[in-house]
Amino acid sequence: MSLELRGITKRFGALTANDSIDLAVADGEIHAILGENGAGKSTLMNIVYGLLSPDEGDISVDGKVVRIDSPLDALAVGIGMVHQHFMLIPVFTVAENIVLGHEKTKGPGILDLESARKEILRVSAEYNFDIDPDALIEDLPVGLQQRVEIIRALIYDAKVLILDEPTAVLTPQETDELLKNMKKLKEKGTSIVFITHKLREVKEAADKITIIRRGKVVGTASPSASQEELASLMVGRPVSLDVDKKAPQLGDVILGVKNLSISDHTGRTLVKNVSFELHAGEVLAVAGVQGNGQTELAEAIVGLQEHVTGSVYLDGKDLTKESVRDALHAGIAFVPESREEDGLISSFSIEENLILDLHDLPPYAKGPVISQRVVQDEANKRIAEFDIRTQSSRDPVSSLSGGNKQKVVLARELSRPVRLVVASQPTRGLDVGSIEFVHQRIITERNSGRAILLFSTELDEVIALADRIAVMYRGEFIAIVPASTSRSDLGLLMAGVKP
Amino acid sequence: MILKKLKLPAISFAMALFVCGLLIAFSDPKVLALRGNPLEMIGKGFSTAGSAYWALFRGSIYDPLLAEGNFWGGFYPFSETLVTASPLILTGLSVALAFRAGLFNIGAQGQFIAGAIGASWVGFAFEMPIFIHAITAMATAVLFAGLFGGFVGFLKARTGAHEVIVTIMLNYVAAYFLLWLLSTTAFLRPGRQDPLAPEVRQSARLPHFLGSEFRANLGFFIALLAAAAVWWLLNRSTWGFRFRAVGANASASRTAGISVARVTTSVMFIAGALAGLGGAVQVLGSEFAMTSGIGGSFGFDAITVALLGRATPVGTVFAALLFGALRAGGLTMQASTGTPLDLVLVIQALVVLFIAAPALIKGIFRLKNVESGETLASKGWNG
């Protein structure tokens, strides 16, 4: 089935999210839509799937213009979508999730799951998906949950499948599996629209690539284009994907973590017996699939976790019992995983966000009074140093783009005397330009003798920055390996396979 | 900017007056009697509502009837408005300040009573020089109510107990403690059986500033001063910075090293102190003798006042003045036109309703980009 979009335009107030976009997906084609965060990819696909209605333009399927006002309409014309965040109910079985909203009954009020189970088994066998219709969703690994979503689309006769950032939550192995399955689907005649910002995957799986920048189609490319070419199209200027870095100049041990375990308030273990040392001038990257205890470990180092055993030393001084404030002032810069929730106060101005940690100390405060002038002067210095794009330091931080928000966090955290930088997913959701900036800044900090503890789920980032790599799996450091370890070995470790 | 901010409250107030005007007109038997003649009925309705609102104005701002031969005497109602507004400003500030720190202080009522108890006790039981006596009485009120409020913050910081539940319960504690207190020999006025405390001494009373025939007293300026102090605290001080930070995003504040527990406790102490000062102003400025009903509904109206004032000190002052005027004028309205006082409560409720549901106003008037109190009104319990 072919899908064609003509002149799709969608505006949100003054922002044009999609500016007369044309797109043609041929029958049995994997069509990648490549673009940075905020380029308008998701808006476009939500229009196709009937979650948003376009201001202008039309959609045709097999040459016939169709009207899609809801996901049900989309399904009716054969368009299915797998969202980035799965729409599954964890405590329901696979079969229950799949019939949800389309329940068949045998007799009044009696659910007919049997036919759904047969269908699931049939589709699962056809594509080798290995899905048990009676398994609970919460017991399935993320990769299988995604397959359940795909099966759901297939059972409802989707001929065009939209996959929105499908690899964001997968291990490298699961990603490879997915790419393989996409090709299998294609062979059986399903067209796939593959939304992503990851260049490697695009090159591997796509037949055709459409690149979107700031709501406009800026070009199409074939998968034979180089990663640099694709990245330049995506960003609109030449970019270098490699991080320049010299061999590390190791100094003394800055951070020591001994037998650190963390549990949540129900007593469930989140991090188990983690020990390591980190030297000045070194980047230790903690790799792993999201949700294996990285967030908690990062927070525990600055004292943000409650149920912690074991100890954390900074420059030989025990920080375990210290408050967050004392840990920060002892020389830790902390870039939290969630900028919006933990990094910034979005209703506050940029200058206020820059002094969250130091607001009651000179030069910002004289006694109990905050000196507005000093705050503004210092803010303007940071804005210049970190190239934060804004009209005024008094603008709310929420008016900034993701990259500039992250620069505000970095500017704040690096303006104290710092010995150790703990950065959790520092480039998540950022555009390529900002990623470059953050990476360079991390390497600059390392070269000037600071210790860097980087948590990242992006293997590319880990490989580009790390001097050593720790792989975290189910709360444990399953291995600490040299930076030269191959991608596939890292992938196995991330899946919990010990060497 | 200021005009834009005032747009929504002003339209809400006008709408409330309009809807309430309909209510006044069409609940009047004389208007209803003209059912057969729509034109006359509308005319009568207009004049009925008009005279009720004229009475409201006479009771709250200026009354020409009182002014005969003495122009200034006509301002007596305005002085009454100030007297009612002063404690409301203080309790309103209490709720507004807590709200800015992300706490919903339903306990201004109890804290108000705690303050009234402190001020009354010092006022009647001790002999002190003028001024010093009043200041000591107010300081005691602030301390009592501050501890009473701070206790809530402490419980929340230590155990996570939700401040809404705790403050609601403590309101009962305060009200019944007062009732018990007024039955003890220490607080019951000698020779009386009904719950009534002795009058506070002359030396502890807040002086009148418009002459002795007006009840307006220093309490109003104390309230204004408190509003200025809260403004300074929130916008200029390191404490206020932390309060606002925790209120806007507690988790980012914690991550940046701010102690949320300490903020919670100190905000509730200050909020309690403000409400307690309100109780002191009521006792030392206008009531003099504490009864079991000293609290009135100052603590509960405070929530509405803070909401209407959008949790800013300046807004709270104006909202409290509006409510004070409605209260004072409502009495005259009832007395001179027979319109029940309860309709004033309807006006208050409607103002808040329109503010809390800005979409309604925006829809009716096709406004765009009105600054709304939406977040404030809908945040509430878990805000």
Image: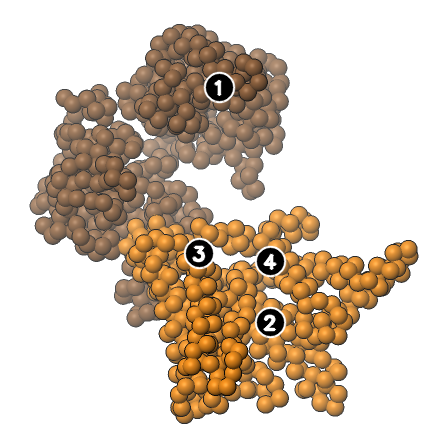
Chain colours: A brown, B orange
How far from the left and from the top, in percent, is residue B140? 38, 78
Q: Is residue B359 above or below residue A426?
A: below
Seen in the image, is B25 located left or right of residue A436?
Answer: right
Give me the chain letter of mark 3.
B
Confirm whether residue A82 shows in the render: yes
Residue at numbered disc 2 = B324
How far from the left and from the top, in percent, is residue B249? 39, 51
* Amino acid type at image mark 3: Val
Residue at numbered disc 1 = A99
Residue at numbered disc 4 = B352
Q: Give the label on residue B164, or none.
A: 3
Q: Which of the two residues, B256 or B198, is positioned nearer the viewer here?
A: B198
Question: Is the residue under label 2 in contact with that under label 3 (CB below 8 Å)?
Answer: no
* Amino acid type at image mark 1: Val
Q: How far apart in space, not on screen, are marks 2 and 4 (Cα)?
A: 15 Å
* Amino acid type at image mark 4: Val
Give me the chain letter of mark 4.
B
Give me the chain letter of mark 2.
B
Q: Residues within 10 Å of mark 3 (few under 14, many from 20)?
A: some
